[in-house]
Image: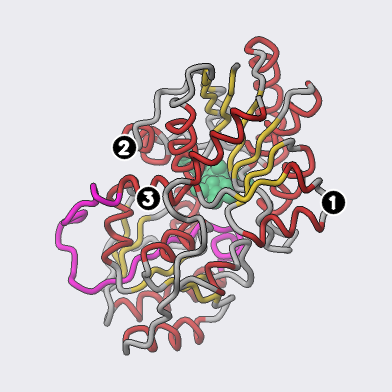
Amino acid sequence: MRVLHVVAARPNFMKVAAVFMALKEYDGIEQVLVHTGQHYDFDMSEVFFRQLEIPAPDVNLGVGSDSHARQTAEMMMRLEPVLVERKPDLVLVYGDVNSTLAAALVCSKLLIRVGHVEAGLRSFDRTMPEEINRLLTDQVSDLLFTPSEDGSANLVREGVAQEKVHLVGNVMIDTLVRFLERTLPEPLANLPSRYALLTLHRPSNVDDLTWLRELVETLEAIGRELPIIFPIHPRTRQRLSSCGLLRLESNGLRFLNPLPYLEFLSLQRGASVVITDSGGIQEETTFLHVPCLTMRENTERPITVTEGTNILLGRSCQRLRQELGKILAGEVKAGSVPALWDGHAAERVAEIVRAFL
Ligand code: UD1
């Protein structure tokens, strides 16, 4: 039996690492890894393969960056002949990036069965490209692996047959658990004892330059009291530099290139607070019991708010200052780790895949 994984972008790599390793335990399953090339910079892709011990992709479609339509279409066109040639019994897709949807659509027309890892998450915000990717991928998937109860409930409400839905827990946390012991005591030179860690890349934050300026100037002011470490996503770097905000010298904000997994995990673990608009980081901080302030109006991961350490701030610098003040005064959400975020989710995926095949 052949399982083909399609991965594309940074947040996919921590997920496939866990599932690939779990499926290796089954002798009768051959695995093929296809990288669409959506992320192609060394520090957005290859360094993760190395650190997470993922085998090199069998096929790289080399698609790269483009508009949503062109990128998605190009992935579909390049993936179709690979699937026709390799004839997988099941294709596994991950998360909510454009490649996830592209692969799911190609498979559904070729009558190849699809499993979606991290199914069912909903922000209920259809202005997000990821929400469209999630909704459509789930509609054409045959196996839907959800990380939490809310994901399963969303799917059943949308009419997905109950028997296709499998609550397995969070495979990204499997990778975190596996690598936690390998975190580095000094991930960066001159790391202050107290610091905030910042990531921003969502279009809602970085494509509106007036808001981006207000946010960065607020963060610079905060950074004079609490140093802020800011590894910058390539799209954010482009926006900051186009409006003159990518300063070489900034008192409180330390601008860095994107960081490898272990360095970033080490920084999360040691941070007083993480400020982000990422999806996965909301989950990782919940697991690590580190306070997380999310600069978004909504989240597809509500369990990180109801059970974890996450607080949604929306687009408000005033709320950012307020909540940060509370955290620094010691008023932090204790938070608990959601059920099945236990480091064994990928084993549950593998067992279900084996039975399915
Ligand atoms: C994508 C995902 C998003 C995910 C994010 C993680 C979609 C719709 N979005 O967003 O859900 O949270 O990945 O990073 O799939 N670029 C580079 N080098 C790279 C990759 C990108 O320089 O290796 C630049 C390109 O100029 C590109 C821009 O970053 O135009 C955005 O890349 P893209 O992959 O389109 O979307 P992300 O913002 O990374």
Q: Amino acid at mark 3?
A: Leu
Q: How many numbered marks appear?
A: 3
Return the residue nearer the eye: 354 or 275. 354
Return the residue nearer the eye: 208 or 53. 53
What residue is rendered at 61% in x and 44% in y?
97
- Asked if the magenta segment contains residue 256, the reply would be no
Tell me if 273 is positioned left or right of 20 in this view.
Answer: left
Using a 10 Å C-alpha cutoff, classify the residue at mark 2 as few (fewer than 14 neighbours), some (14 to 19) or many (20 or more).
Answer: few
Residue under label 3, please give it.
Answer: 176
Residue under label 2, please give it.
Answer: 51
Rendered location of residue 87, percent (x, y): 67, 14
Under circle 3, the secondary element is helix
- Single out the residue that lies furthest toward the right: 159
Under circle 2, the secondary element is helix
| Dot placed on the residue nearer the N-terminal end, 3 or 2 | 2
Q: Amino acid at mark 1?
A: Gly
